[in-house]
Image (cartoon, rainbow, N blue to C red):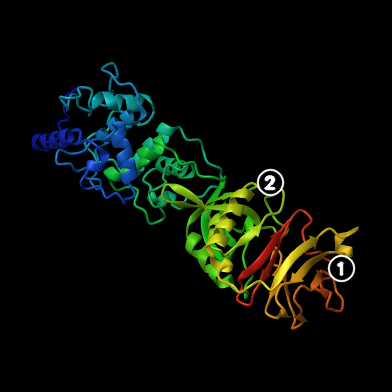
């Protein structure tokens, strides 16, 4: 097949020289002098170089910011996927030349032919491929998505970009598939300001091919942008065109006005505000308030971080697990244990605990809600003095604050859930109609005046 008459001779010679440079091996991936090890595409370039998919220039550079020709990408993706290519692969596009590389007589026409036969490319028209045109970001994403044979995402899935950012509906549809299935991980979460029609850089090409070969499967079936952070454990996420209230599963943070409440809200905002998150539900999907219960995942480079776990690690949340939603209970317990060991957040430096939690009688005879005073926590006093300034909380944030009553060391008393007159042996929470301690499991926390947890007891 002859060279297209529309390509001037000098331009053609320059392109051939550029192609030859691209295809000269440069050695180990870390030998690329212009690839910053901290760059978002560095791992991808190193991996593809080790696989023999990509090469660098004779001067030891890779030029990750430079664009790539469509025919160059055809060879890259064929090599990346390990697809067989031979002279028998006949290219039907009339504008694709033959034998541009003496070291590889199959380039570029036979590589383009393989891409066409596999449905990776459909050409710019039925008879043309535009081999000497730089591949755009939208074309790159579409070809990779086709190579991966990605299924349609759920109708409710809303990517952070819009159809108007693409030149063709097919490009948007493929980008939507790619976003849902994790192929765009590492690209910096392309949003409504992202330019998809401009040429893709060599670094971006490597990232997508790397994702194709080493997929990072994002968790959860739901995804959408966070539109608001309500407090430390509740956010609003746009799903299916509507804002939904989402409660973080497995954790509880201080209530508004309590110590560390503002810090928890600020921390959650820094983690998810404005981000497109993935939502993973458990057995029970909604709470009694109609909030979606979810493990909230946010992209961090090529990995996905569970926000629920991060809040525990920061010491700004505590464990709150209610069966049957216990999928990650052990993982969350380990995170809280780390926070306790490091003194993070609410587990920070506190004075000597004035109380020891001896036991919890959480299952009162008969109906718990009708027999509140037979539900109680037994404490033993460790330090003589008043308990004013200290408080007791359960996993959901029900809070009892001690009055100014003096106790003696080793004295034992009970904190009963119902109403009554306080004595030295029995204190009364004052609840009516609803029990506090969950029969299926709960945590008793004693907090000091600054909100630090000085002791806790889980059952």
Q: Is residue 79 above or below residue 290?
A: above
Q: Is residue 378 visible?
A: yes
Question: Sequence-wise, which precedes: disc 2 or disc 1?
Answer: 2
Numbered label attached to residue 446? none
Other-residue count near label 1 (Cα within 10 Å), few / some / many at <14 / 14–19 / ≥20: many
The kind of secondary structure element at disc 2 is loop
In which quadrant will I find the N terminus? top left
Q: Position of residue 164 (x, y in %)?
A: 41, 51
Question: Which circle, 2 or 1, is nearer the viewer?
Answer: 1
Residues 376 and 359: in front is: 359
Residue at mark 2 to residue at mark 1: CA–CA distance: 32 Å
Residue at the extreme left: 10
The kind of secondary structure element at disc 1 is helix
Residues 35 and 386: in front is: 386
Q: Position of residue 82 (x, y in %)?
A: 35, 26
- Residue position for label 2: 283
Left or right: 32 in relation to 268: left
Residue 369 sits in which quadrant?
bottom right
């Amino acid at each position: 097949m002859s060279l297209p008459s529309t390509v001037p001779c000098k331009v053609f010679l320059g392109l051939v020289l550029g192609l030859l440079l691209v295809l000269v091996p440069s050695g180990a991936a870390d030998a690329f002098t212009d690839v910053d090890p901290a760059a978002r595409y560095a791992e991808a370039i190193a991996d593809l170089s080790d696989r023999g998919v990509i090469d660098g220039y004779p001067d030891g550079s890779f030029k990750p910011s430079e664009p790539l020709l469509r025919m160059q990408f055809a060879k890259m993706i064929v090599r990346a996927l390990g697809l067989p290519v031979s002279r028998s692969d006949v290219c039907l596009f009339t504008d694709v030349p033959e034998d541009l590389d003496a070291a590889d007589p199959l380039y570029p026409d036979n590589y383009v032919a393989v891409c066409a036969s596999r449905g990776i490319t459909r050409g710019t028209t039925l008879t043309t491929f535009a081999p000497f045109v730089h591949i755009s970001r939208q074309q790159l994403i579409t070809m990779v998505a086709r190579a991966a044979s990605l299924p349609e995402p759920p109708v409710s899935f809303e990517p952070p970009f819009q159809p108007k950012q693409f030149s063709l509906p097919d490009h948007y549809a493929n980008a939507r598939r790619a976003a849902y299935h994790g192929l765009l991980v590492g690209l910096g979460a392309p949003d409504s300001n992202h330019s998809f029609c401009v040429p893709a850089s060599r670094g971006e090409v490597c990232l997508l091919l790397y994702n194709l070969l080493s997929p990072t499967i994002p968790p959860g079936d739901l995804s959408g942008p966070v539109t608001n952070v309500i407090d430390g454990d509740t956010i609003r996420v746009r799903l299916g065109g509507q804002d939904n209230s989402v409660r973080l599963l497995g954790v509880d943070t201080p209530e508004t006005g309590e110590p560390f409440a503002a810090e928890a809200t600020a921390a959650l905002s820094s983690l998810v505000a404005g981000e497109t998150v993935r939502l993973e539900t458990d057995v029970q999907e909604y709470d009694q308030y109609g909030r979606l219960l979810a493990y909230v995942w946010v992209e961090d480079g090529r990995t996905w971080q569970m926000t629920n776990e991060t809040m525990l690690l920061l010491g700004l949340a505590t464990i709150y697990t209610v069966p049957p939603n216990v999928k990650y209970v052990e993982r969350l317990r380990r995170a809280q244990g780390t926070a306790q060991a490091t003194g993070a957040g609410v587990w920070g430096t506190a004075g000597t605990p004035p109380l020891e939690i001896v036991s919890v009688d959480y299952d009162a005879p008969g109906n718990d809600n009708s027999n509140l005073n037979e539900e109680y926590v037994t404490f033993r006093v460790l330090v003589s003095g008043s308990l004013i300034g200290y408080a007791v909380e359960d996993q959901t944030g029900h809070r009892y604050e001690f009055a100014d009553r003096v106790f003696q060391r080793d004295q034992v008393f009970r904190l009963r859930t119902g109403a009554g007159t306080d004595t030295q042996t029995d204190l009364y929470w004052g609840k009516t109609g609803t029990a506090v301690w969950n029969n299926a499991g709960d945590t008793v926390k004693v907090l000091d005046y600054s909100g630090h947890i000085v002791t806790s007891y889980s059952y």
